[in-house]
Amino acid sequence: MRARDILGPQGPLARAIAGYELREGQLRMADVVEDALAGDHIALVEAGTGTGKTLAYLIPALLSDKKIIVSTGTKTLQDQIMEHDLPLIEAHSGLGVHAACMKGLANYLCLRRYSEFLTSAQTDQGPLSRDVPALVRWRDTTRAGDRSELAGVAGDAAIWAHVTSGSDTRIGARCRHYEECFVTRMKRAAEEAQLVVVNHHLFFADLAVRGSHAGAAVLPEYDAVVFDEAHQLEDVATEFFGVRVSSARLETLVRDAQRALLTSASTSASIGTRLLRTVLETGAEFFSALPRGGSAESARVPLPGEAFAGRLQDRMHALDTALEAVWAHCRGRAAESEALAQTARRAQQMRDNIATIAEGGNRTHVTWTETRGRSVSIGASPVDVSRILREEVFFRAKACVMTSATLSLAAGSTSGPFDFAKQRLGIDFEAIEEIVASPFDYAEQAALYLPPAMPDPRDARYLDRAADEIVSLVELTRGGAFVLCTSYRAVNELVARVRPRTSHLHVLVQGDAPNSILLDRFRALEHAVLFATASFWEGVDVPGHALRLVVIDKLPFDVPSDPLIVARCERLRETGEQPFMSYLVPAAALALKQGFGRLIRTATDRGIVAILDGRITKKGYGKVFLRSLPPARRCTSQQELAMFWDAESGVDTPRAPDVPATAL
């Protein structure tokens, strides 16, 4: 049996599911995935929105005789596959489904840390105490220990940092909770399954520990891997094959060590507590001495080896000495508890990581510091992960399928549509390449509005003009809008200008509540306008009338001062390439394609995408962006756009008269 026999017009899914929609693109993609798995090939498949790509790779995977890892871009997609797609296949296709789901360790309740937390004084402290009853009730009923099951406690609640597992807190077989451990159960289920659903972060975390610690693998051995949302691979690999130390990680180490010391003799606990207090003090002094970014646009700044001199060097040595004292104290008492032995290992690992970063960047790595909220980090990141991906992923697995709605760019005179993705991923060998177009009729369903005479985004007049356009657009559609910005600064500036003029609409702003709650509010309100940044550019699905307008403030170029971007551009110059056209423009074009993709999610969706960056029509490189977007109807005036909207919405929408751009 082939996958198209199940997905086709005479297949079991068509017979069993009322209103089943035959998709030729889905059948073609299933053929490609099937051939790649059977022939041990590498395949890149761009599958436009609405293709039905999830079933197009799941069914060939289940039909194969291989153990397959399916790696997704988000935990949300993992849950969709496990809770919706695989049960649908099992119920209606006649296929046996033997699958398991694996998430990162931080998603699971750690029974050891949970037990230690309940016996600590922290259960009575402020917001933590409010969530304890719900946590205890859930612990008594959960089978998987997956924190996403507990709807009564927010995903970002402080209590999770005290009770979940982690790579630096997990003890393994020596833990007295090992047999009943939720992570142990998860790993055993994955060993037995034919198909294992993970996310990219877990996949690359596994690769990173495989290379550095023998026998430390998280995932079971596998024959083939399917990457969904494969456009994220370079960024995720860069994160996990680098080193990061943060003030938040240091605070977690101290908090866990304090609990571990409670099981020690009183003298030992007293001494250890004093040592931990010194770690916190020297850590705060070290992180406060790090250089800061000059603006919100560039939170990550270079941290070369020569920066570790003078005051910063003194503070680093003080922190290292304090960590060494904790390491020695806990190692000397490791026989008292495995938690103390684990504390010693974590303290030593943090010392090693800081020393690695302090050595400074080199030909292969760039070092940096970054501030996010209250947490400050230092890190070292690989400049180029193409070799790592080639050797650790593509040469390790027998077959590999990469799919996404945004893998290709419009082919140039000397380049193919997948050339940019292949270069970044290290695919310098023969691979199957397939583009499966979206079944949606973009020319009928969507308008691309490019307002004329927009000032350059660096022009002082830009924000006022952009705000005028946003107000006109949300009045036209009566809300239902995402305003996607390339920075938090732009969000704040535009909200300040737009909110007073749209008081009859619900204005939501990223950061005012967790993203999931903002999305729920947006869907429910129907006439809302949501201002957001990068996390809403992709992986957000709002089908139907609730989202009918997507406004993009600027072309999403990487921050040019980011030390990693600077290093990558320099590497390209050394090889004779022009980094702006060979790297920055293609990367931004793929990101813009993702932003555009938020609008049309079903065959009945209708709406407008507006790009307020005049460079897309004025600059030569703008053609790269435009050629890579879906073929929506292009409009360059408010009158033209209003005619499209009236025709699509079926109503005569009240609106202001068309105003020449020069008058705004």
Image (cartoon, rainbow, N blue to C red):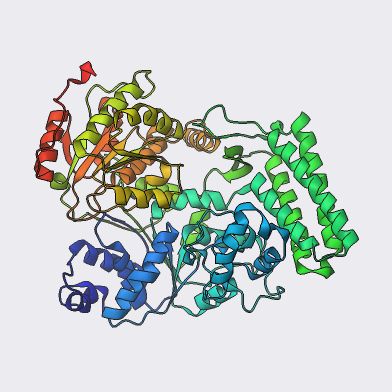
Name the foreground residue: 651 vs 561. Answer: 651
Name which residue lies at 20% across and 44% down: 607
Q: In the figure, residue 51 lies in which quadrant?
A: bottom left
Q: Nearer the viewer, residue 443 or 391?
A: 443
> Picture coordinates of residue 159 (x, y %)?
60, 57
Residue 276 seen in this snapshot: yes
Residue 216, given in percent of the width and then of the height, sits at: 63, 67
In the image, residue 212 sits, relative to residue 192, either above or below, namely above
Quadrant of the snapshot with the C terminus: top left
Query: Which residue is at the front of the view, 98 or 461?
Result: 461
Side (left or right) of 270 relative to 464:
right
Count of residue discs: 0
- Quadrant where the N terminus is found in the figure: bottom left
Residue 117 appears left or right of 529: right
Q: Is residue 312 above or below residue 81?
A: above
Residue 550 lies left or right of residue 325; in this view the side is: left
Residue 628, compared with residue 326, is above or below; it is: above
- Rendering quarter of residue 196: bottom left
Res. 349 in view: no
Q: Position of residue 353 (x, y in %)?
A: 69, 49
Measuring from the top left, give residue 503's x and y in whole percent.
Answer: 31, 33
Quarter of the image for residue 183 reads: bottom right
Instruction: Name which residue lies at 80% across and 63% down.
Output: 262
Q: Residue at x 62, y 44 (%)?
A: 380
Q: Nearer the viewer, residue 139 or 52?
A: 139
